[in-house]
Amino acid sequence: MTESDRLNRRAAQASIAVAAILIVAKLAAWLLTDSIVILTALVDSGIDLLASLVTFVSVRQAAQPADRAHRYGHGKAEPLGAFAQAGFVGGSALILASEAIRRLITPQPIRQSELGVGVMVLAIFLTAALVILQRAVVRRTGSVAIQADSLHYGGDLLMNLAVIAALVLSEALGSKLIDPLCALAIVAVLLYGAARLARQALDMLMDRELPGAQRAHIRELALGHPQAEGVHDLRTRRAGSDVFIELHLELGGDLSLDQAHDIAHEVEARIRGAFPDADILVHQEPAGLADERLDHKIAAVEPAAAGSKRG
């Protein structure tokens, strides 16, 4: 197991522990206050626990080495887990929305709001500590599953603040409508986060290219070799923490096979300096060779697609 895998697993275990503690605290607070915003926070913590379990399983699966049946490794277990999390969040948000609407129709008072505020302060403290840990791990590993979990808990910080505001305002103004209205606002935030998370997971599952700046940097590194005459058919993708880079390197046709092989290794080393954990494949071919290229196929398709959009 690599250091990145160990960090991802520890972050996943920490999120499970935090979610379990908050479920117990928020359940007690909801039973004592009967507040719908605390119920939304409780359900959200339940989602977080389920999502964190999915994250732990997906991170552990993604860490498995390549085998005969999965020669590219198991990195896509991470976006699959993130996509499942988006489904959990979206479905639960809709259930909470129906309960909040019911409370708008038949408002009910909040009991012992001070206790609810105390529990939410505890939730903010634990969640903030977890988010700091997760973001540090994401910077080290690039894990999309841990990033998805961090997005959840980052949103929870805002949600917990909103819950405190709703409890305080409800008590100060004596209004029974503030509680469900704040709950509906939180539901909107949850649905937005779920949509964003699903889009990120789908991009990875569909092998979306790395950002343009990173692709340009890869091309510059390859062309920076003194004997590189051109680069084409650059393809990149990410699967969890794994990055895959493939390119065709154009070299002088008078080079021997051994010379071309050595140059390809030098180019690979240059790219690996910027992408240390990437799986890099450099294909050598003579410069000026007229062959069928992926770049040509993409160039032919894109103008047609742009024309159909304008039409």
Image (spheres, rainbow, N blue to C red):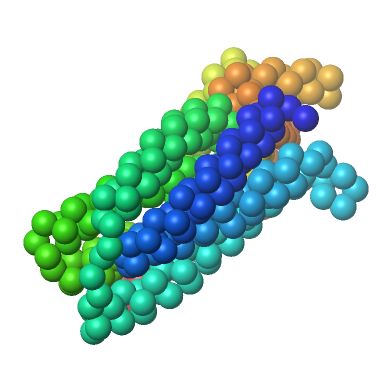
The picture quadrant where one finds residue 175 is bottom left
Please tell me which residue is depicted at 73% across the width and 21% down the height of the picture.
Answer: 265
The picture quadrant where one finds residue 303 is bottom left
Please tell me which residue is depicted at 70% across the width and 49% down the height of the picture.
Answer: 57
- For the N terminus, the image quarter is top right
Q: Residue furthest top?
A: 226
Nearer to us in this view, 36 or 139: 36
Location of residue 101 in the rendering, given as x and y in whole percent from the top left corner = 29, 79
Q: Residue furthest bottom?
A: 105
Nearer to us in this view, 271 or 12: 12
Asked whether residue 87 appears in the rendered view, the answer is yes
Nearer to us in this view, 240 or 29: 29
Decide if residue 11 is on the left or right side of residue 301: right
Asked whether residue 245 appears in the rendered view, the answer is no
Location of residue 134 in the rendering, given as x and y in whole percent from the top left corner = 51, 35
Please tell me which residue is depicted at 16% across the width and 58% down the height of the picture.
Answer: 171
Please tell me which residue is depicted at 69% across the width and 25% down the height of the picture.
Answer: 3
Decide if residue 113 is on the left or right side of residue 230: left
254 over 239 or under it: above or below:
above
Location of residue 193 in the rendering, given as x and y in whole percent from the top left corner = 39, 57
